[in-house]
Image (spheres, rainbow, N blue to C red):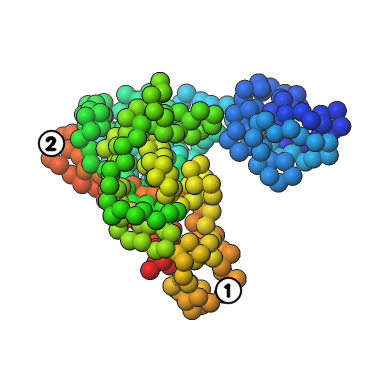
Amino acid sequence: MVREFVVPDSADGARIDLFLTQVCDGHSRSQIRLAVQDDGGEVDGRIVRPSFKVRSGQRIRFRLPTESSDDTVPENIPLDILYEDDGMVVINKPAGMVVHPARGNWTGTLTSALAFRFQSLSDVGGPTRPGIVHRLDRDTSGVIVVAKNNAAHLHLAAQWHDRLVKKTYLALTAGRLDRDRDWIHAPIGRHPYQRDKQAIREHHESSKEASTFYEVTARHGRVTQVKVSPKTGRTHQIRVHLAHIGCPILCDRLYAGHAVLTRAALSRAAGRPLAADPDSGAGAGARSADDDEIILNRQALHAHQLTLLNPQSQTEMTFTAPLPADLRRVIDLLD
């Protein structure tokens, strides 16, 4: 539910989370603050943080927080199934889909789609995470494995714990990686002041060792195509590690400082006119209205391949999710 307010003279200079707590009955300040932190508050059309101080006459548009539920609500959401047997199902998750219900994302999740499609899933992860063995960030597409029963879940979870699962991601970075291949060894912990971020933190109580191997597959000016294989599985690991070496993932809102990419911006990053877009009818280097079109609005990271032991047959299996259309288009323009 969205509500709109005009800041009165009496609230001039107040923090937005405090002001909204006063005018929105039935919600605590902590609930309001978290909703604003999740981009739920806009002042004169601009998303702000909870500490923002409002001024008299400003217009606020606020998305009220939704109460959470302990139950996964089934939703008829299409699933791209790569593989299925009695013990597990392998999904090609689209970008933009949250894996399980969480603050600010109670519907439209992968678990809701799974609950609608399958009669039973493992309950090892609890009622809000049926079948979920591992996860992908909301804006990361690609291969994700779901357990249908508890025995399969425990077997798969042990493989992740023992680092036996081979994972390969494809990414586009906003920067030029000078080395063709290398390891990144840097501990990752909670960001010191931004709750939704992780950071490289040496000798901090929240830090855990993290190792990532990368291999460059193509270079286009200041844009690099890279294949990434994380050895460990820390939160945001690939995103944090690539940003740490000066090449954050394209369109990574948290770590690259931008969330959208236009055709013109991509051309500047590539350092040359782009190949003609087959949908535009324009030649290479031609200026057109399409230059300001947003061609990518999520982080350019795709979980391309996963290799593990099938919990039932004990045979090694590899699952591959093809590159999605949005990332393929960016690469085609660069090529």
- Look at the picture and state if 11 lies above or below 45: above
- In the rendered structure, the answer to whether residue 177 lies left or right of residue 158 reads right
Q: Which residue is mark 2?
A: 314
- In the rendered structure, the answer to whether residue 214 lies left or right of residue 201 reads left
- At numbered mark 1, what does the secondary structure look like: helix, strand or loop? loop
Identify the image quadrant of the N terminus.
top right
Residue at 64% from the left image edge and 35% from the top image edge: 49
First along the sequence among labels 2 and 1: 1
Distance of label 2 from label 1 (alpha carbons): 55 Å
Q: Nearer the viewer, mark 2 or mark 1?
A: 1
Residue at 84% from the left image edge and 33% from the top image edge: 8
In x, y percent, where is residue 285?
Answer: 50, 75
Residue at the far right: name it. 9
Residue 288, label in figure: 1
**Toward the viewer: 131 or 276?**
276
Q: Quick one: label 1, few (<14), some, or many (20+) residues within 10 Å?
A: few
In x, y percent, where is residue 131?
Answer: 33, 32
Q: Quick one: label 2, few (<14), some, or many (20+) residues within 10 Å?
A: few
Residue 91, label in figure: none
- Look at the picture and state if 72 lies above or below 138: above
- Residue 331 placement: quadrant: bottom left
Residue type marked 1: Ser
Residue at 36% from the left image edge and 53% from the top image edge: 177
- At numbered mark 2, what does the secondary structure look like: helix, strand or loop? loop
Identify the image quadrant of the C terminus.
bottom left
- Residue 151 placement: quadrant: top left
Residue type marked 2: Gln
- In the rendered structure, the answer to whether residue 71 lies left or right of residue 155 reads right
**Toward the viewer: 241 or 178?**
178
